Image (cartoon, helix red, strand yellow):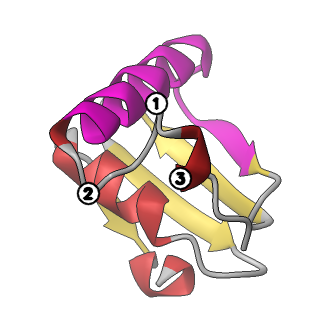
Amino acid sequence: MMDWTWLGLFDLKTPEGMKAAQEWTQQLITVIVDGGIWIVPRSGAVIRMNKKKKVAHVALAVSPDPAIVAVLESLGWTIENRSMLL
């Protein structure tokens, strides 16, 4: 998995980085239709987004991506099959 923390924007270990990641993710979620699919190229993750229930169902993940879990859970989402991303 690519390490993007060098950008300093989405370092989830800092309050600023987590806030930036939350804002970016929330903006992305607003453009996905309820029941739509979020495909994450860096991990090959395929995630169906149930916006009404705030449930993200991980259908596939080629490599781990714990940042998705951390950010979605911090936004109050439940993640089904979360172990696929860890």
x, y percent for residue 13: 26, 57
Q: Residue at x 71, y 63 (%)?
A: 45
Closer mark to the observer between disc 2 and disc 1: 2
x, y percent for residue 79: 36, 63
Give the mark, 3 or 2, whose residue is nearer the N terminus. 3
Q: Which residue is mark 2?
A: 13
- Which stretch is magenta? 16-39
Q: Is residue 27 magenta?
A: yes
Q: Is residue 15 above or below residue 1?
A: above
Depth check, front residue: 56 or 44: 44
Q: Residue at x 19, y 47 (%)?
A: 74
> What label sits on residue 5 in the rendered view?
3
Q: Quadrant of the N terminus?
A: bottom right
Tell me which corner region of the image, top left, top right, bottom left or bottom right, holds residue 65: bottom right
User: Rounded to the nearest whole Å, what is the CA distance between mark 1 and mark 3?
Assistant: 16 Å
Label 2 residue SS: loop
Label 3 residue SS: helix
Q: Is residue 50 above or below residue 84?
A: above
Give the mark, 2 or 1, whose residue is nearer the N terminus. 2
- Across the whole image, how many numbered discs are drawn on residues? 3
Prevailing secondary structure of the magenta residues = helix
Q: Is residue 48 magenta?
A: no
x, y percent for residue 54: 29, 40
